[in-house]
Image: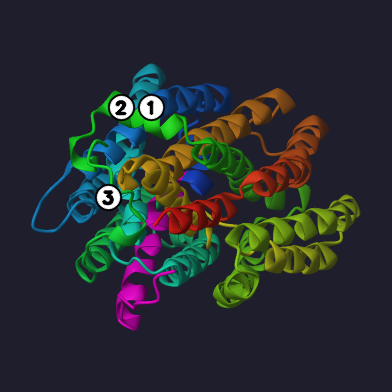
């Protein structure tokens, strides 16, 4: 294990703040875009959901493309930082345009939404997100520092989502409500994202990779000379890449169903939309507490995979009580168990997980060891790819399920079928998906595989 320290404390904070920038756009889109489109613009949720999913077809292709481009990039800023820096300009611009749909025919509005939603996700957010994730492997070769980076960035993500849960709807009203209010909030989020992303990118620098674990086989192709299809072959023959990609997809289906239905749940099931901020805080604040101890737990157990698996397994058990109190509409006990659940699931929960990026670095190291090829950017594309595919399916599912339950955005009151569907989306479906996540985590034993290879290689030497 490499014990050399590469980063100062302020560089770790600066890197982590990149998730603040990311969630200013992703959080606003995933939590509130559907509400804006259905309740303000009067668009149909099922059509919006379908367009979102179709958009993800393009999105899924570009994730791996940008990962490969990062691996092939050589510049004064390094491999990943140029993509992270300049792509944010497009992210901020598209975010404002998405919440500024002009008055025109509905068909044209659907087309307008689809065009800028696809540009935001498939091009700019993807390039920025893949580059940002890749940086955790490029700015340090120390595994413990990588865990710290994951924990710090997720703390920023948690705080950002909590603040937005409390502030967005109030901010919209403060700026006059309606379309003008949403547009003003989008502009503010876009500017914050642009400034913070620039600071995060320029405060760190990329370092040379650790050559001590690389196979000395000159016949193997070099990372910057690897073609796209050759990269795909290395990628999808790595079983751990496939597992973690599936993990990301399932996780973000769950996350986006919960996030997308949260405002509907508090408004129609609990009868008080202002509770959304409190639910966001009780769900995400304990994750900060958990992530403070995550590096110590990983160091003590010697395994990121074990920490994630057992934390999520306990979270699933506690979910039984959470469902019961939700059926009773006992808000206080719901919030209590949401808090407790968040502590145990804290090492994995959130838009980008505390230790999951470090696991991806381990998986990238597995390819580096066994194939002699370093392809960090392409490997880290699984995080962005999983976010986009899983997030797209999850967000689309909210629109489809709302329509299936009979939800009408302009109606003063919703039917019992719509309310039951909202309850299922926010309470029941996420628990089922949590069980699937726990099973996948149990299979992600890449650290053991790397140790085994190192032991065998040491004997050869």
User: Distance from label 1 to label 2 (Cα)?
Assistant: 5 Å
Give above or below for 434 relative to 291.
above
Answer whether labels 1 and 2 touch (C-beta < 8 Å).
yes
User: Distance from label 3 to label 2 (Cα)?
Assistant: 34 Å
Left or right of 55 in this view: 417: right
User: Distance from label 1 to label 3 (Cα)?
Assistant: 34 Å
Depth check: 310 or 217 in front?
A: 217
Determine the residue positioned at 61% across, 39% down: 250
Give above or below for 141 relative to 437.
below
Q: Position of residue 79 (x, y in %)?
A: 19, 51
Q: Which residue is mark 1?
A: 233
Tag of residue 92: 3
Magenta region, main secondary structure = helix
Give above or below for 140 relative to 70.
below
Asked whether residue 91 appears in the rendered view, the answer is yes
Front: mark 1 or 3: 1
Tag of residue 230: 2
Q: Residues within 10 Å of mark 1 (few under 14, many from 20)?
A: few
The kind of secondary structure element at disc 3 is helix
Q: Which residues are magenta?
A: 1-29
Determine the residue positioned at 61% across, 68% down: 287
Q: Position of residue 44 (x, y in %)?
A: 54, 25
- Which badge, 3 or 2, is on the more N-terminal residue? 3
């Amino acid at each position: 294990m490499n014990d050399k320290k590469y980063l100062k404390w302020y560089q770790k904070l600066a890197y982590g703040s990149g998730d603040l920038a990311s969630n200013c756009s992703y959080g606003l889109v995933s939590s509130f875009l559907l509400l804006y489109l259905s309740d303000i613009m009067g668009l149909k949720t099922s059509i919006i959901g379908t367009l979102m999913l179709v958009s993800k077809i393009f999105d899924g292709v570009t994730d791996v493309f940008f990962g490969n481009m990062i691996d092939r990039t050589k510049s004064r800023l390094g491999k990943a930082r140029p993509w992270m820096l300049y792509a944010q300009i497009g992210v901020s611009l598209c975010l404002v345009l998405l919440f500024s749909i002009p008055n025109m025919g509905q068909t044209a509005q659907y087309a307008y939404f689809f065009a800028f939603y696809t540009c935001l996700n498939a091009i700019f957010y993807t390039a920025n997100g893949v580059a940002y994730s890749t940086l955790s492997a490029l700015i340090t070769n120390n595994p413990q520092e990588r865990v710290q980076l994951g924990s710090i960035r997720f703390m920023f993500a948690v705080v950002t989502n909590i603040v937005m849960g409390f502030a967005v709807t109030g901010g919209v009203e403060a700026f006059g409500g309606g379309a003008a209010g949403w547009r003003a909030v989008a502009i503010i989020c876009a500017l914050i994202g642009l400034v913070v992303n620039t600071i995060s990118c320029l405060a760190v620098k990329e370092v040379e990779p650790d050559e001590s674990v690389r196979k000395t086989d000159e016949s193997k192709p070099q990372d910057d000379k690897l073609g796209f299809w050759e990269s795909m072959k290395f990628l999808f023959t790595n079983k751990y890449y496939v597992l973690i990609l599936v993990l990301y997809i399932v996780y973000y289906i769950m996350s986006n169903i919960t996030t997308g239905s949260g405002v509907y749940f508090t408004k129609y099931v609990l009868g008080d939309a202002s509770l959304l901020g409190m639910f966001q805080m009780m769900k995400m604040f304990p994750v900060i507490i958990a992530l403070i101890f995550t590096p110590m737990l990983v160091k003590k157990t010697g395994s990121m995979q074990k920490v994630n698996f057992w934390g999520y397994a306990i979270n699933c058990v506690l979910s039984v009580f959470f469902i019961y109190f939700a059926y009773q509409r006992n808000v206080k006990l719901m919030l209590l168990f949401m808090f407790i659940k968040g502590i145990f699931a804290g090492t994995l929960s959130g838009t980008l997980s505390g230790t999951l990026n470090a696991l991806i670095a381990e998986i990238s190291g597995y390819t580096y060891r066994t194939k002699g090829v370093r392809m960090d950017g392409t490997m880290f594309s699984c995080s962005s790819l999983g976010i986009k595919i899983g997030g797209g399916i999850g967000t689309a599912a909210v629109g489809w399920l709302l329509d299936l339950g009979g939800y009408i955005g302009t109606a003063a009151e919703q039917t019992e079928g719509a309310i039951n569907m909202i309850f299922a989306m926010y309470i029941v479906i996420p628990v089922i998906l949590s069980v699937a996540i726990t099973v996948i985590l149990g299979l992600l034993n890449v650290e053991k595989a790397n140790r085994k290879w190192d032991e065998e290689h040491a004997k050869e030497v």
